[in-house]
Image (cartoon, rainbow, N blue to C red):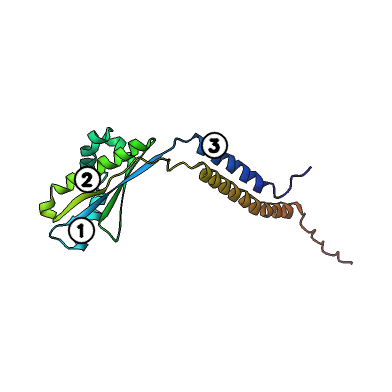
Amino acid sequence: MKAPRWLPLPLGIGVGLLGGLGYGLAATPQYAATSYVMVVPQHADSPTALGFAQAYGRVVTGDAVLAGARAAAGAPVDRLRGHVQSQTSPDAPMISVTGTASGGAAAARYANAVAQSLTATANRTAATTGVRLLVFSTASAPDAPSSPSVPLATAVGASAGGLLGALVLLVRPAARREESAAAVPPPAKSLPARETV
């Protein structure tokens, strides 16, 4: 019995759904906690503070800042670098420092340690830069993991499988047309009529 043409679509969705569900259940949950650091101008105007916020946001994962956070975070520099991210705002002199870990308490500890180290590192040159950094809000341990979400992973897997199944459906008719065209023999050439003498 010949399989129906539409079979790749539900098959792809089913395989993708199972794959996404398996990933969501097997992957280690990751927690995220965020601390906020504000750049406060002393003798500088607001645009200058905004520029310094952008600059300091780029050095959050630098060696100097992470080395200062190592003791409070309870983790080596290399580990911190892989578990800390920073973001800056184009509108406000604010730096967000996000720590990620397999536990909520560790994520908050990473974020707070790096935020404190960034503040201390920047304030050593406050007399020159004209701005000071203050920890505006400390990170607290989250109650729930930020990723992976089992429903989200399942939905993404099903969507990816459905997309692949649809692509197979789109490609198959073209392949069949080519096979049909190859199977049809070329028209026979008519032989020239013999001349009668």
Q: Is residue 20 left or right of residue 84?
A: right
What residue is at 51 percent from the left and 41 percent from the top? 150
SS class, disc 3: helix
Residue 24, given in percent of the width and then of the height, sits at 51, 39
SS class, disc 1: helix
Q: Nearer the viewer, residue 158 or 91?
A: 91
Residue 111, given in percent of the width and then of the height, sits at 29, 42
What residue is at 22 percent from the left and 45 percent from the top? 118
Q: Is residue 129 left or right of residue 75?
A: left
Quarter location, residue 190? bottom right
**Earlier residue among tags 1 and 3:** 3
Mark sitting on residue 22: 3
Q: Nearer the viewer, residue 46 or 181?
A: 46
Where is mark 2, residue-wise? 118
Q: Nearer the viewer, residue 61 or 145?
A: 145
Please state which amino acid type lies under the numbered disc 3.
Gly
Where is mark 1, residue-wise? 49
Please state which amino acid type lies under the numbered disc 2.
Leu
Residue 41, given in percent of the width and then of the height, sits at 17, 58
Q: Nearer the viewer, residue 33 or 15?
A: 33
How many angstroms separate mark 2 from mark 1 (CA)? 15 Å
